[in-house]
Image (tube, grey):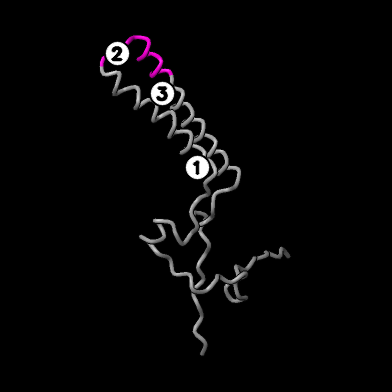
Amino acid sequence: MVKRQAYQPILITDASRSQDDQLNSRQKRYVLMMGIRVACLVVGAILVGTKAPLLWLWLPLCGLGMVLIPWLAVLLANDRPPKEQHRLANKLHPRHRDEPPPAALPAEERPHKVIDAEP
C-alpha cells in the first residue's frame, strides 16, 4: 500500500506582498525620512538664528541628520523585501515544505456535488 502525503493548503499569509504595495510602502518611508531631513534643516536654522546655548553640539547633530538621512532614505527606497529563506519569521517557525502540494485533489477527496432530481 502506498502511503499518501497529507494535503497542505497554501496559506494566504505565505504570499509575498504585491509590487504596488511594496512600492507604496517604500515611497511613504522615503517621504517620511525626507520630512525628518527638512525638520533638521529648519531646527538648525532656528538654532543659528536664536543663538541657542550649546550651539556647538546641536548644529553638528542637525548637520549629521541632514547628511545621513538622505543617504539612508535612498538605500531603503531602493531596497527589496528579504527572500523567504532569510526572513526571521521563517527561522523562528519553520514550515515543512519538502513536497509541493498537489495541483488538484485526487478523485476520492474531491467534494461531490449532490444534484436532487425531482420526479
Whole-angstrom CA distance, mark 1 to mark 2, is 33 Å
Q: Position of residue 90 (x, y in %)?
A: 41, 60
Do the CB atoms of the residues marked 3 and 2 lie less than 8 Å apart? no
Residue 29 vertical placement versus 97 (above, below):
above
- The one of 7 and 24 positioned closer to us in this rendering: 24
Mark 1 falls on what kind of element? helix
Query: Who is closer to the viewer here, 39 or 108?
Result: 39
Extreme residue in the right direction:
119
* Labels 1 and 2: the sequence-earlier one: 2
Disc on the earlier residue, 3 or 2: 3
Q: Residue at x 54, y 44 (%)?
A: 78
Which comes before the other along the chain, label 1 or label 3? 3
Camera-side residue: 5 or 35?
Answer: 35
Vertical placement of residue 57 versus 86, above or below: above
| Residue 89 position in % (x across, y down) | 40, 56
Q: Residue at x 35, y 60 (%)?
A: 92
Q: Which residues make up the magenta segment?
A: 42-53
Separation (CA) of disc 3 from disc 2:
15 Å
- Write down the residue under mark 3: 40
Q: Main secondary structure of the magenta part?
A: helix
Q: Tell me residue 54's x, y (percent).
A: 26, 18
* Magenta highlight on residue 114: no
Mark 2 lies on residue: 52
Q: Position of residue 96 (x, y in %)?
A: 44, 69
Say which amino acid is labelled 1: Leu
Mark 1 — residue? 75
